[in-house]
């Protein structure tokens, strides 16, 4: 049996492995979340791209597909106008684990905990991590600059962020950003993390909702093909394409936030990640995209992660 250095997260969520499948917009639907729970991880539905009725459909489907529905969670960006409705719908369907992000951890933590939920907040700096602890969350995700999707403005890398956060917190820390295999999982544990959250590597599985065109583009990606953009609005790591070039042009000439918002418009991320418009869609992805060249099932991925971790720790 593979031993992990900390049981804090596996006991908190009642899961086999200290591995969290990230809740990604347009990617982490019912199939991915359920498959992750069935493989022994925590599976998260990414509600940031879902209106309440669509989230409810995914919740029902995920629960029906999962062998361990208690290991299902929902990620809710707090800046989203439907956040309260999403929370209430999730609670109605028995979800007791919530990952909140993109907003103050004080906003819903007490409400969730009063309803018997476990709350984890995503943060990108030790200062913000302390605010999360003060707000009463049960754990934090400390997400480094390498991560895909929305990111921190301070650009602190995972290697530096994790020890900084673990040094100031008394609650469990989940490392995220740049984690793709057993070696990077082992590295996160060496830095003091209690678990890992993995996004892009789970995006690149058969059960994710990402369009095949998007997956093919990731396989072709080179090490310099992603960059953190739109820091004046909402920092997001993008895969380079025509849309990226337009964002870069605006930023090079010092355009105001309003111009970025206008360019982004509505449905740009859906257009790229779900519908497969690789030229003009918004493609959110992590730096590890350059290291990925296959699209396994979730079960195959988790098995390989655990095996690679075991081989890594046995080297020492």
Image: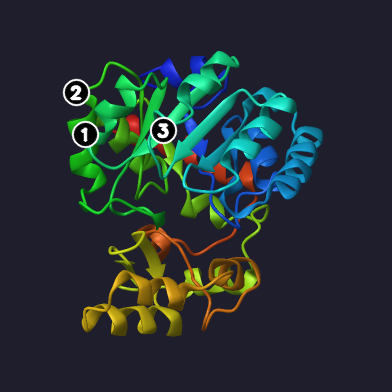
Q: Is residue 207 above or below residue 188?
A: below
Q: Residues within 10 Å of mark 3 (few under 14, many from 20)?
A: many
Which badge, 2 or 1, comes first in the chain's sequence? 1
- Give the x, y percent position of residue 172: 36, 21
Which badge, 3 or 1, comes first in the chain's sequence? 3
**In this orientation, which residue lies closer to the viewer: 276 or 107?**
107
The CA distance from mark 2 to mark 1 is 7 Å
At x 32%, y 69%, the residue is: 257
The CA distance from mark 3 to mark 2 is 16 Å
Q: Which residue is mark 3?
A: 121
Q: Which residue is mark 2?
A: 168
At x 56%, y 23%, the residue is: 16
**In this orientation, which residue lies closer to the viewer: 125 or 258?**
258
Proximity of marks 2 and 1: CB atoms separated by less than 8 Å? yes
Which corner quadrant holds the C terminus? top left
Q: Is residue 234 above or below residue 7?
A: below
Q: Residues within 10 Å of mark 1 (few under 14, many from 20)?
A: many
Q: Which residue is mark 1?
A: 126
Which badge, 3 or 2, comes first in the chain's sequence? 3
- Give the x, y percent position of residue 274: 63, 66
At x 50%, y 34%, the residue is: 99
At x 36%, y 77%, the residue is: 259
């Amino acid at each position: 049996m593979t031993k992990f250095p900390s049981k804090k997260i596996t006991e908190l969520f009642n899961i086999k492995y200290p591995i969290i499948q990230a809740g990604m917009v347009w990617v982490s639907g019912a199939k991915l979340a359920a498959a992750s729970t069935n493989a022994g991880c925590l599976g998260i539905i990414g509600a940031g791209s879902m209106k309440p009725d669509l989230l409810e459909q995914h919740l029902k489907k995920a629960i029906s597909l999962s062998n361990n529905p208690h290991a299902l969670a929902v990620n809710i960006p707090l800046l989203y106008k439907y956040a309260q409705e999403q929370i209430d719908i999730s609670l109605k369907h028995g979800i007791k684990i919530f990952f909140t992000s993109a907003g103050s951890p004080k906003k819903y933590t007490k409400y969730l905990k009063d309803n018997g939920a476990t709350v984890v907040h995503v943060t990108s700096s030790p200062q913000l991590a302390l605010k999360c602890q003060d707000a009463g969350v049960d754990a934090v995700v400390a997400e480094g600059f390498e991560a895909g999707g929305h990111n921190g403005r301070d650009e602190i890398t995972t290697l530096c962020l994790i020890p900084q956060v673990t040094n100031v917190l008394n609650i469990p820390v989940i490392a995220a950003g740049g984690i793709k295999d057993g070696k990077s999982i082992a590295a996160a544990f060496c830095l003091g993390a209690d678990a890992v959250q993995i996004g892009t590597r789970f995006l690149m599985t058969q059960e994710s909702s990402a369009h095949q065109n998007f997956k093919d583009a990731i396989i072709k990606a080179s090490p310099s093909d992603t960059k953190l953009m739109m820091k004046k609005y909402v920092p997001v790591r993008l895969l380079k394409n025509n849309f990226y070039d337009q964002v870069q042009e605006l930023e090079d000439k010092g355009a105001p936030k309003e111009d970025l918002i206008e360019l982004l418009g509505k449905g740009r991320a859906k257009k790229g990640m779900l519908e497969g418009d690789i030229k003009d869609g918004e493609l959110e992805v992590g730096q590890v995209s350059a290291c990925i060249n296959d699209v396994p099932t979730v079960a195959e991925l988790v098995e390989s992660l655990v095996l690679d971790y075991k081989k890594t720790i046995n080297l020492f």
